[in-house]
Amino acid sequence: MSTFQAPKGTYDLTPPRSAKFLAVRAAISGPLKNSGYGYIETPGFEDVALFARGVGESTDIVSKEMYAFETKGGDKLALRPEGTASVLRAALEANLHKAGNLPVKLWYSGSYYRYERPQAGRYRHFSQVGAEAIGTEDPALDAELIILADQAYRSLGLTRFRILLNSLGDKECRPVYREALQTFLRDLDLDEETRRRIEINPLRVLDDKRADVQKQLGGAPMLRDYLCDACKAYHEEVRNLLTAAGVVYEDDEKLVRGLDYYTRTTFEFVHDGLGSQSAVGGGGRYDGLSEMIGGPALPSVGWALGVDRTVLALEAEGVELDIPATTSVYAVPLGEEARRVLFGLVTELRRAGVATDFAFGGRGLKGAMKSANRSGARFTIVAGERDLAEGTVQLKDMESGEQQAVALDELVAVVRARTA
Ligand code: HAM
């Protein structure tokens, strides 16, 4: 071990486990690519004010968890704690919404940073794959996104996840509810910090996990009873479309989410094998965010799924992903001359598209064959002086144990045919 370790709250992805992360990213992005979402990449840091305004000054993410810093040039930046504000900023900056093709549908994959107290499933550096559909108010778009996330999780073989669904209302009905809730909460026996929260973000109090707080929330007014007719109808339509698609969800009136930009549809994917950090993904509609960051009115909806927690969910369910061995052919030279010849063949095979590896470092046959086995390669090529004198190499099928001599100049064709 070196003097250094990965910083607190972070970990390295190393083979073989790292292959699961690639597979999860591919499984989540697959349905999106197949549904008209284009790939977007934004910087790992942004103007700190983008998150303060977008995600919300009163959220834990902005007030406690942001990696904010000032550069030598005096710019106030923050490592991105989430992707939505950045993606919307980038879409506005590139005028994607003016190309006349709404919604602008985008997907992304990357690293995000939150200065949280690390625990199982909660890290300071984590990875998300996300999707945003910008500029259209249509319940079918909300439904589409939930259906695609469900499809992604099912394609991975996950079964023990649940979809929690709620509506947070809009700028008409939510303020009325907010006030009613505040009036109710102010009469309760709560600590100072929670009292402060009542004034800044009362909906978050409903989400308080402490039993003594939950006990007092029994008679709290519920948002459902305050939703305006338009919000009610919208939510009903989302629910109907999900049901028609065979996607099972649970209505969860207490689902609030930790970011301020949400309006109407909100949802979370939770997994029952993960303990307290059970949210594997979440999202919702954010009709006001564009205006909050200085853009035009662009009603939008999106989600982000946590790659780290999705991998943990797979492990909790004991799902073994079908990850094919990366190497198809492993070459083992015996002696100096064979090294040169086989190294040349390895290059040829690779150029012909065959995944090939080589026993580097001049090891003996036993050690080299061990590496060949470990590589998962279906075939090994072994050659010594006698083989080369005859113009051949030994091609061994590692599954059947069968071995045949193949002429040097036919090897690429034979291997290609047998690995196709
Ligand atoms: P979020 O719920 O904050 O939403 O994060 C989405 C997912 O990222 C979580 O469900 C979780 O799986 C993962 N995640 C978040 N924090 C951590 C952490 N500290 N360690 C490990 N995994 C974590 C958003 O970020 C919104 N931008 C989603 C969205 C997109 N809403 C609309 N569009």
Image: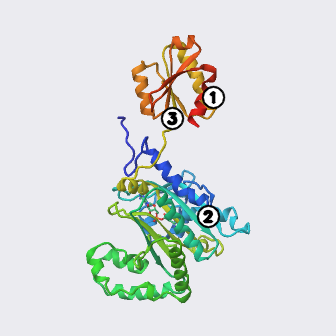
Secondary structure state at the residue bearing disc 3: loop
Q: Amino acid at mark 3?
A: Thr
Q: Quadrant of the C terminus?
A: top right
Residue nearest the viewer, comparing 154 with 40:
154
Amino acid type for the residue under numbered disc 2: Arg
Is there any visible trace of residue 204 in the rendered image? yes
Q: Earlier in the sequence, mark 1 or mark 2?
A: 2
Q: Does residue 75 show up?
A: no
Do the residues bearing badges 3 and 1 touch, measured as CB atoms within 8 Å? no
Check the image and name the residue furthest to the left: 212
Q: How far from the left and from the top, in percent, is residue 327?
A: 51, 35
Tell me which label, 3 or 2, sits earlier in the chain: 2
Q: Is residue 79 above or below residue 173?
A: above
Q: Position of residue 39 (x, y in %)?
A: 62, 56
Label 1 or label 2, whichever lies nearer to me, is 1
Residue tagged 2:
89
Pointer 3 residue: 327
- Coordinates of residue 27 in the picture (x, y in percent): 52, 55
Secondary structure type for disc 2: helix
Between the C-alphas of marks 3 and 1, the distance is 17 Å
Residue pictured at 49% horizontal, 42% vertical: 324
Per the image, the residue denoted by label 1 is: 413
Query: Which quadrant would the N terminus be assigned to in this image?
Result: top left
Residue ID at (54%, 31%): 356
> Ligand 1 near label 1 (Cβ, under 8 Å)?
no
* Disc 2 crowd, CA 10 A, few/some/many (<14, 14-19, 20+): many
Asked if disc 3 and disc 2 are in contact, CB closer than 8 Å, the reply is no
Q: CA distance from mark 1 to mark 2?
A: 51 Å
